Amino acid sequence: MAASIHSPEVTHSTYAAVVIDLDGTLIGRDEEVSPVVAEAVAELALIVPVCIASGREPSDVLRFAAQFGLEAPQVSDNGAVILDPISGRTLHSFPMPARPAEEIVRRLERLEISFIATHAGGTATAIGEIPSWDLARVSALDLDEAGADRVAAEFESAPDLHVVKASLPYNGLWAVDFTGVGIDKGTALRRVAEMLGTETERMVAIGDSYNDISMLRECGLAIAMGDSPQEVRAVADYLAPIVDEDGLAVAIRQFVLPRIRERAGRG
């Protein structure tokens, strides 16, 4: 059952857009959107702009955005890339500094840790596939949580990097995302808000993992999924059921849609 954590002071003009994390929020381990969630998101998208904000590469974000016919800017690569879901082109990117990007990739390869790197032409999973070190994001993949903590600790003091771990619900393992310093989902949402002609205080964010904390803090209303780590719950205003219980649909129907409609009714 969904439950309120805090009771934020919310005005009826607050909700102008909704931002939804992908893994563990919109989709679960099967990487599919359940029919119940699909119906709720489609209904929501008819009323306000809906933005997916994910640590994944652009192709994955665009694929799910297309499933719902979303037209608002979408966010990939943990905030490093903002996409036009209609044309598929990049609207804005926040590239990493070249030297630390190369150092990360070479170190991960020496340690035989799987990675994915996003560049202007696509993605790479090996050094030989990288055309230049102008990378938007690098992610170390398929780590247990202790391993993810070790990798993150190696780089967390680097002045040119933002480092955060994220859960991978599709295999139960963890990733460590690297972007440029100060670049995260919260950063991207400030730019998306400008594009939409609104403010982040008038946006709702829904997520489940550590890389969602920045956007949950940035937006005016924060909703965490039921199996979120305590650090994520701590910044949430509302706790939804887990993804396997269609928690996103519950959050949309019980908490978001009634307030958006209430606002529209008073407008």
Image: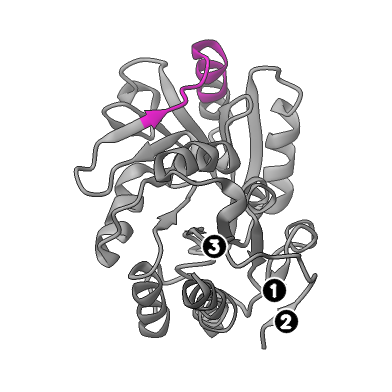
Give the amino acid type for the residue marked by disc 2 in the picture: Ala
Q: Is residue 100 magenta?
A: yes
Report the number of numbered marks: 3
Q: Which residue is mark 1?
A: 239
Q: Earlier in the sequence, mark 2 or mark 1?
A: 2
- Label 2 with label 1: CB-CB less than 8 Å: yes
Query: What's the distance in space between the residues labelled 1 and 3, CA to CA?
Result: 18 Å
Camera-side mark, 3 or 2: 3
Give the amino acid type for the residue marked by disc 3 in the picture: Tyr
Residue 234, compared with residue 146, is above or below; it is below
Mark identifier at residue 3? 2
Badge 2: few (under 14), some or many (20 or more) residues near its Cα, within 10 Å?
few
- Relative placement, left or right, of 156 versus 41 is right
Badge 3: few (under 14), some or many (20 or more) residues near its Cα, within 10 Å?
many
Tell me if residue 184 can be seen: yes
Q: Earlier in the sequence, mark 3 or mark 2?
A: 2
